[in-house]
Amino acid sequence: MSSSALASFQHARILIAGAGAIGCTLAARLAAAGHDVSVLARGRTLQALRDHGVHLDDLEGQMRVAVRAVADVRGLGAQDLVLLCSKSQDLADLAEQAQPAIGPDTVILPLVNGVPFWFFHRHGGRFEGETVRSVDPDGRLRALLPPEQVLGAVVFVTAEATEPGRVTSRTPHLLMLGEPGGGLSERLERVCALVRSSGIEARPLERIRDKLWTKLIANLTSNPLSVLTGATLGEIYSDPRWLPTVKALMHEVMLTASAYGARLEIDPIEFLRLGAEMGDVRTSMLQDHERGRPLELAAIGDAIVELAQRYEVPTPHTSELLARVRRMSAPTQARAA
């Protein structure tokens, strides 16, 4: 990314690939801040964005923002920043569609849940450079998205697309960004500053994987369990029926994280309290299940089990939960196919 593009905050070329709830939230905020934003979309969402722009209703109020919505990025040229906003299982296809917009200086920011494909890039441990097979079984992601151009991200944005191009969010927007190799860098600071210019909090982290493990705990303890129970976040983290499972899952992920040298700043009691305060928020996985869509079980669950197995950490509760969710969701997805 060119220094001049990001220094001005007015002429950075940004592609947001994926126009779901997170993508539209970021598109609205970045475009409203004056950035040159293009959105890769399709179908009804593409038409809605072209006709009406993005409608965002969040804690700052309501806004309607015009964006450049495209079905093909080949006419855009190389972008300064490419944000890939999708479910983890759709990331490779989205990355392929975004290829013409990725130049040698483009910073790539995948905003997905779960264990990232770049996890072992500049990891520095015994598995340096290896592949997380659950999320990148054929190495396609690593080939499409050069890890040296990638910034890691942990997304704390809860939003729901009520209809194409219209998004509601009732929580603060926060992105935590970091270099896969650790430490702070000029490009990391510049991207954080760009994001902040849109009113979204962006924190540069020296050890992005530490916060990633915290998000993995949140993902695993909420998303699959919500499919089994139909419960909201507030219910999952407060109902005595679910708490023993939540705690067992939490302990398995924390043990796995410690095997990888993570420095977790998580108080389990406080974690449960904060989760309960999320109230009637419904997880994205529950929404996907109700609509018959594929679930992000590979990145959110299987990858954790895979990482645990490398250090022979047992994960019986995680494995059982994933199996139960797959059995439950199979009929729904079969009807939708």
Image (tube, rainbow, N blue to C red):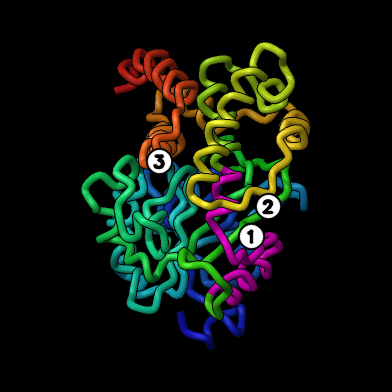
Which element is circle 3 on? loop
Classify 283 as above or below 120. Answer: above
Residue at (46%, 51%) from the top-left corner? 85
Magenta stretch: includes residue 300: no
Q: Counting residues from the N terminus, which is met first, the one under dot 3 or under dot 1?
A: 1
Q: CA distance from mark 3 to mark 1?
A: 42 Å
Residue at (77%, 53%) from the top-left corner? 60
Circle 1 is placed at which residue position?
29
2 or 1: mark nearer the eye: 2
Pointer 2 with pointer 1, Cβ within 8 A: yes
Quarter of the picture containing the C terminus is: top left
Residue 139 locus on image (x, y percent): 24, 53
Residue 4 locus on image (x, y percent): 53, 88
2 or 3: mark nearer the eye: 3
The residue stretch that appears in magenta: 188-215
Q: Work out whether residue 59 or residue 313 is closer to the camera in this orientation and state it.
A: 313
Circle 2 is placed at which residue position?
173
Residue 287 locus on image (x, y percent): 52, 27
